[in-house]
Amino acid sequence: MRVTALIERDLRLAYRRRGELVTPVIFFVIVTTLFPLALSPEPALLRSLAPGVIWVAALLAGLIGQDSLFKSDYEDGSLELMLLSPIPLEWMVLLRVFTHWLVTGLPLVILSSLMALLLNYPTNAMGVLVMSLLLGTPVLSFLGAVGAGLTVGLRRGGMLLPILVLPLSVPVLIFGAAAAGRAALGDPAAAPLYFLGAMLMLALTLAPFAIAGGLRVSLES
Amino acid sequence: MYEPAASQALSAHNLAIWRGERCLCRDLSFQLSAGEALQVQGENGAGKTTLIRVLTGLGRADEGEVRWRGEPLRRSGAEYRACLAYLGHSNGVKLGLSPRENLAAFCALLALPDSGAVDDVKGVLGRVGLSAQADIPCGMLSMGQRRRAALARLLLARVRLWFLDEPLASLDVSGVALLTEMLKAHLAGGGLAVFASHQLLDLGPFPVKAVALGLAA
């Protein structure tokens, strides 16, 4: 079996709809720039706010487009074909979340260092911030995919999704922002990063089963 | 085309399917052997789609069971899925991709070996009459052409069991002829087909069994 063919298909589809992919990125930029405007442009304050702002903005931007993860497959019947394929659904779902993260999560991670500079985040701590996002945003993608799988059959699923997913994202947010915050103060940030890594491993191994289960239930009726 | 096997049979045993408070069928049993077709009949809303989904394993029956080669579906899982092709109401065709790209991705879904897949796709597209449209995004094709791209999937899959839900939808006269010819070739090769349709298909010498829904309620 050529795994790459499925990734290739998803990437090609993403490329043909690239206009949609820019939306979360622009949203991310706008949200991070709103904070200095609303609070105060004072460098010291921004510096202490930066990790939290970046992380909340990345979390919210990641939610955009999350409900469309399986929506078009549901509507055009491709999802039924995926369920009827001899390849395990869990495996295909894992690939799908990976490609989705590649086109939506990774741009945010790359852009975050630029936005952090804008918020006066210390450059010598940048590595930790980027690392925390690299470990944390895939977990958010997996959590979002669980919600997307469960709500794919609902007409207003897009409204329900953030309510389902955001509470589950809290641990990722706490450890992600903690890692970046500690690094900014010059404290060791290994512990929260390890926690993020552990969460990523958990998501990587357990979420595909939850996502596939949700999709099966959604398609049963 | 297929490996010879004596017990290539799909059977249903006392199926009962409920949709909420409504009973779609009760005590439904049938047996389908190699080279036979089954037509599911019934009015709109009688539950034809639901029955076909139960037979594919997408849906679940409230009572009774479906067996393939004597083995209940619950146990055969991926093995059963490797034997069947399904054409639903929706075509399962990505509108952003061309027919050729769609079929290439489908090859991956089927876990088909890589070698020869490209030639296969080309041949199959020719057979369903989409050679000239092979590289145009499906979103720009007509409904009938999209349906043909979906039919091409059946040919590509080379499996024994076909489940077709309203296969004639949006097909023109030559499309219907194409499907009839495809079905005949499939049955002649020892395949089985279950289809839901309001029209009677003339499959020549091949026996068409019928299941009528909507009488139980």
Image (cartoon, grey):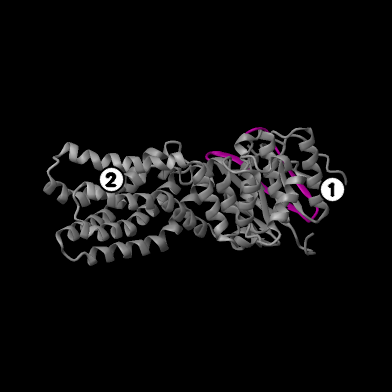
x, y percentage for residue A170?
A: 27, 52
In front of the other: label 1 or label 2? 2
Magenta part of the protein: which range?
Answer: B20-45
x, y percentage for residue A50?
A: 20, 49
Would residue B66 be counted in the magenta stretch? no
Q: Between residues B193 and B179, which one lies in front from this camera angle?
A: B179
The answer to whether residue A17 of the structure is visible from this angle is: yes
* Residue type at numbered disc 1: Phe
Query: Which residue position holds label 1?
Result: B206
x, y percentage for residue A79?
A: 55, 48
* Residue type at numbered disc 2: Ala
Q: Quadrant of residue A158?
A: top left
Q: Is residue A43 left or right of residue A108?
A: left
Q: Chain of mark 2?
A: A
Q: Residue at x 21, y 60 (%)?
A: A124
Q: Between residues A179 and B51, which one lies in front from this camera angle?
A: A179
Q: Residue at x 28, y 59 (%)?
A: A132
Q: Quadrant of residue A155?
A: top left
Q: Residue at x 13, y 40 (%)?
A: A40
Q: Chain of mark 1?
A: B
x, y percentage for residue B113?
A: 66, 62
Q: Is residue A127 left or right of residue B207?
A: left
Secondary structure, mark 1, is loop
Would residue B42 be counted in the magenta stretch? yes
The reply to whether dot 1 and dot 2 touch (C-beta < 8 Å) is no
Secondary structure, mark 2, is helix
Query: How much space separates mark 1 and mark 2, taking CA atoms?
Result: 63 Å
Quadrant containing the N terminus of chain B is bottom right
Query: Which residue position holds label 2?
Result: A57
Label 2, residues with CA under 10 Å away: few <14, some 14-19, many ≥20: many
Label 1, residues with CA under 10 Å away: few <14, some 14-19, many ≥20: some
Quadrant containing the C terminus of chain B is top right
